[in-house]
Image (spheres, grey):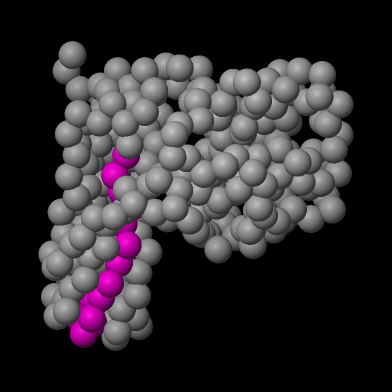
């Protein structure tokens, strides 16, 4: 499948800040499941490209005298393949043991640990089958509800509330697996939804679990599926914080900042 992706973030200020510096993780990598045919990131200011410890392509943008409107645009065309959600470990990747480390967003409480331990025997008997069963059980336990959480919400808070969005499902799944000694990582990206004519309001996120002798297997808990050719990954990391599409600091403008995000994913003509 060939997917056209456009991701626009617009910042508006009544009183423009005097300085702005941002880090973007808005560039997908070519791997077994996707081939980046063309891609570009555009923004006003001075921009430099680098690679972080997780192998993600990043850009740093510095704007010394920001205007009252800053627009960041990323997008291009990606050819995807359905690899059943499986990606092998690649040369240069961090050791999988790194992804056993809990963070403030993934740290499970006793309720999450108990929930995952109920599935431990099934995971030992058949890792893949057990992971799919666990994904389905978690999706039944935590409803998908926009607006119920924000980017600062933790796995424990979301699990207790019983509702959240894709990043919350990923954090709970990752934190619970790590508590069982199974490496798991966070994946940010996009999802093509051919059933909806309107563009997506935001990007997407899912988890990937390390399965020995197989590789990284993705689990999109919100949609109860492994990765397909409708998924495009942007970045991997320990949690949302290490994968955030845009992070930054500024001097001034905080009290009146408005942000608008527009994401569209559509199929290209074959």
| Front in this rendered view, residue 72 or 161 | 72
Against 54, is 29 above or below?
A: above
| Front in this rendered view, residue 185 or 15 | 185
| Front in this rendered view, residue 60 or 54 | 54
Name the spot of residue 126 as percent of width and height, x first: 76, 18
Name the spot of residue 97 as percent of width and height, x first: 64, 44
Residue 199 placement, left or right of 153: left
Q: Residue at x 67, y 47 (%)?
A: 100
Against 175, is 5 above or below?
A: above
Give the quadrant of the N terminus. top left
* Residue 234 shows in this picture: yes
Q: Residue at x 39, y 54 (%)?
A: 52
Name the spot of residue 223 as percent of width and height, x first: 54, 30
The answer to which image quadrant residue 9 occupies is bottom left
Against 202, is 255 above or below?
A: below
Q: Residue at x 68, y 20 (%)?
A: 128
Residue 81 placement, left or right of 184: left
Does the stretch in magenta take in 159? no
What span is colored magenta in the figure?
A: 12-28
Does the stretch in magenta take in 21? yes
Name the spot of residue 27 as percent of width and height, x first: 29, 44
Residue 94 placement, left or right of 40: right
The answer to which image quadrant residue 188 occupies is top left
Total marks in image: 0
Q: Residue furthest top?
A: 270
Give the quadrant of the C terminus. top left
Q: Residue at x 35, y 69 (%)?
A: 248
């Amino acid at each position: 499948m060939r997917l056209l992706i456009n991701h626009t973030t617009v910042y508006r200020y009544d009183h423009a800040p005097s300085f702005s510096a941002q880090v973007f993780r808005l560039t997908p990598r070519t791997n077994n499941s996707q081939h980046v045919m063309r891609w570009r990131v555009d923004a006003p200011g001075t921009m430099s490209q680098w690679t972080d410890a997780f192998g993600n392509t990043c850009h740093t943008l510095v704007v010394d005298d920001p205007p009252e409107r800053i627009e960041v645009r990323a997008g291009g065309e990606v050819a995807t393949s359905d690899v059943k959600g499986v990606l092998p470990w690649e040369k240069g990747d961090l050791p999988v043991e790194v992804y056993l480390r809990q963070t403030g967003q993934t740290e499970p409480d006793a309720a999450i640990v108990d929930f995952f331990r109920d599935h431990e025997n099934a995971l030992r008997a058949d890792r893949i089958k057990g992971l799919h069963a666990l994904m389905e059980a978690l999706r039944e336990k935590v409803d998908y509800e926009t607006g119920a959480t924000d980017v600062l919400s933790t796995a424990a808070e979301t699990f207790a509330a019983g509702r959240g969005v894709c990043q919350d499902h990923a954090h709970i799944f990752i934190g619970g697996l790590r508590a069982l000694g199974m490496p798991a990582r966070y994946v940010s990206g996009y999802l093509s939804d051919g059933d909806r004519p309107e563009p997506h309001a935001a990007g997407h996120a899912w988890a990937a679990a390390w399965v020995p002798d197989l590789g990284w297997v993705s689990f999109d808990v919100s949609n109860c599926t492994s990765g397909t050719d409708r998924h495009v990954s942007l970045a991997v990391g320990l949690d949302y914080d290490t994968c955030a599409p845009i992070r930054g600091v500024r001097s001034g403008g905080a009290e009146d900042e408005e942000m608008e995000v527009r994401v569209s994913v559509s199929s290209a003509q074959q």
